[in-house]
Amino acid sequence: MKYSYLFLFLSLSLNVTAQNVFEGQVHFFDDNKNKQPLEGATVYWDNSSIGTVTDKSGKFSLPVSEKFKILVISYLGFDTLKQHIHNYDNQQFLLTSNTDEQLDEVVVSKQKKTIQKSYFEAQNIVTVNSAELLKAACCNLSESFETNPSIDVNFSDALTGTKQIKMLGLSSPYLLITEENIPMIRGASQAYGLTFTPGTWVESIQITKGTGSVVNGFESMAGQINAEIHKPLSQPTLFVNVYSSVDGRNELNTHFTQKISDKWSTALFVHGNQRTQKNDKNNDNFSDNPLSKQINLLNRWQYIDAEKGWVGFANIRYMDDHKQLGSLNFDPSIHKNSQLFWGSEIDTRRWDSSLKIGYVFPELPYQSLGLQMSYSQHDQQSYFGLNTYDINHQSFYASFLFNSIIGSVKSKFKAGVNFMHDTYDEQVVLDSYKRTDYSLGGYFEYSYDNLDNFSLVAGIRADSHNTLGVFLTPRLHARYVVAEKNIFRGSVGSGRRIANIFAENQPLFATSRTININSQSDGVFGLNSEKSWNYGLSYRRIFNLFSRPGDLTVDYYETHFQNQVVVDWDNYREISFYNLDGKSYSKSFQVSLDYELWNNLDLRLAYKNYDVKTQYNDSFKQRPLLAKNRLFGNLSYETYPNDNNALWRFDTTYHQVGKQRLPNTVIYNNEFSDSFSLWNAQITRVFSNRFEIYVGGENLGNYRQPQAIIDSDNPFGPNFDSSIVYGPIFGRKLYAGLRYTIL
């Protein structure tokens, strides 16, 4: 199981083995009657949900308990083995082939869920795998949540076509967004960073509700989203994805993988997209989507020495992104810096590099060391009409981690240190702002699991920050299982962050609003750092109804701010930033149901209610552009594969978005938007393991927000505003694509 330890270590959650773990090895006889290890066999304790699969050496390990006595081992084409285990010494097992029996074969199989909810973890984690991402176009990370009820997806403005995400009623700056547990979408990349990771690169996404682990830093205030990128060792030799949509967007993704030696593998990911077509379906003389062009390259190297316990990853990445938006008649070579036609260009160049090294002690597989380092340089040059906004952000991150146990594998701990250094250089219209942030922190996280019905993770970290000073960040997560089918979870924790007011609110530059910063402290821009506490409860019930499996989950979370930078849009002549003077909170309630209606026919339903209010200068009121009520539905069906593994996939998703409070403008005065619904659907035809095509549509009901741009006829006048967006701009979008793989 050394491979498993190494991979799990990289996600900073090491499953360990010691005296409370049962290890064994599974074999079979090949055609020449030679004994061979059997990879991929399912091994589990009878009448339990605790199981695993064998590795390439046929080895496995399982946690033990007094109530586990019968071991079950199964693999297609072999007789299932059930054996009573009298002792937990390392044992050998032999499966007998049943292919010689001349009997009609009936195979009963069950597919792995594309969205998996945590059962054993103390934290409330939802894992989205690559199969779920294929249910939508998923051109980039921001579009990877359309079929997931935990995340809300909205457009950020009426011009850039950029989608932003929210969770627990709060926008992405309050979430810690990481890539393989390294902080990624932060600072300068907050506005557009989710569009910089192509969807085909993503292997899985882990969504954690509530404050995350102290291991990953102090910035998680409402949750964490972690994206895992495909590993070279597990990728096919060649993968090609081609995509095209009616709005003029075209994409090409190619992945090349090469195994250099038994220990070295490498992969090259190449992504390119462009939109060369202008569209104006709402007849306001502004393009509904920007003209765009992006090239994105990632080279990954993977090293594994299982015998000696070493594993490593090295990444280097370059991205060049260009957007042109604004008036249909705008030509930047002619009209830039003029008032003849309103237009904008956003040019972003970004370098990323990272190194991850892990070591698992060969004689102590429950003990490991890890080092992570990353560096990024983000350079954005942009203008919006006559407003200039440039930002250069350089970031360095390093983390050292040590894992071990206290007495037995029931009690484990993680300890380590983090260092982060950020430099910002911003040009905002005619003003320049420079600052440097750096912090050094240490943490200790203790976890307890009785291997049955109770687990707990308690962590605390201490950080010294050049602006925030010295502070503590405590976090606690607990899980309790009642009769195996009922899981209760609770969490509490705090978070801190410094608001990057311009980078996080770039739609303000595509308005005629003036910027008002109400300075009341010695913090960044005279604004205090943000601090919050998050509390949450979750209940999950696993059930069977009419002999079909189901899953009911109820979540309730509250985030209360002690300090917050209030972003006030309610004076249509300006946007104001000031320190919170009063209460601010977000209360989130969600109930979701997953149920198998029939073989391969799955239904997913959810209802969400948000109560998000802030004390503004004039009153205590609901946060704007946030629907208080949302409904979600997803229905998916997949046919059984034939001998060539050909099959059909059908998927449809429904969103009902409730009314949203609109900020005061010349046309809105404490009004609420209309509620609306969105339908998305996709059909995929898989011809073989190598080739498939797909067609789909988004917003099939063709809903469009009326008057998305305020005073579009006078873009250089005092009332122009493209930031008040609550719904789609383009309307119905159809697309098609293909995927080709060489294994």
Image (tube, grey):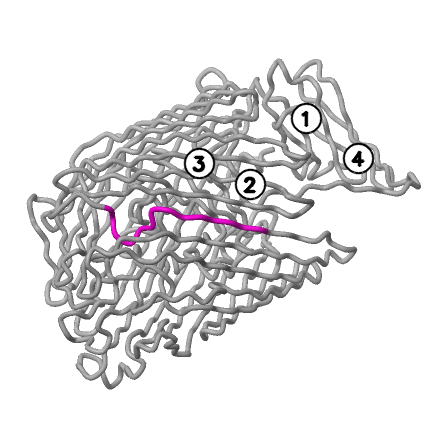
* Amino acid type, residue under disc 1 in the picture: Gly
Q: Quadrant of residue 677?
A: bottom left
Label 2: state its secondary structure. strand
For the residue pair 405 and 525, the one nearer the viewer reads as: 525
For the residue pair 476 and 678, the one nearer the viewer reads as: 678
Between the residue at mark 3 and the residue at mark 4, the CA separation in whole angstroms equals: 34 Å
- Mark 2: give few (<14), some (14-19) or many (20+) Cα within 10 Å: some
Residue 284 spot, x, y in % from top left: 30, 76
Q: Quadrant of the C terminus?
A: bottom right
- Mark 3: give few (<14), some (14-19) or many (20+) Cα within 10 Å: some
Check whether the beta carbons of the residues at disc 2 and disc 4 lie within 8 A of each other: no
Residue 15 spot, x, y in % from top left: 52, 30
**What is the number of the mark on residue 594?**
2
Region in magenta: 622-635
Mark 3 or 1 closer to N-term?
Answer: 3
Residue drawn 81% across the image and 33% down it? 79
Label 3: state its secondary structure. loop
Look at the image and say whether residue 676 sits in the magenta stretch: no
Question: Can I make out residue 308 in this image?
Answer: no
Q: Which residue is mark 4?
A: 28
Look at the image and say whether residue 632 sits in the magenta stretch: yes
- Marks 2 and 3: which is nearer the front? 2
Mark 2 or 3 closer to N-term?
Answer: 3
Q: Quadrant of the N terminus?
A: top right
* Amino acid type, residue under disc 4 in the picture: Phe
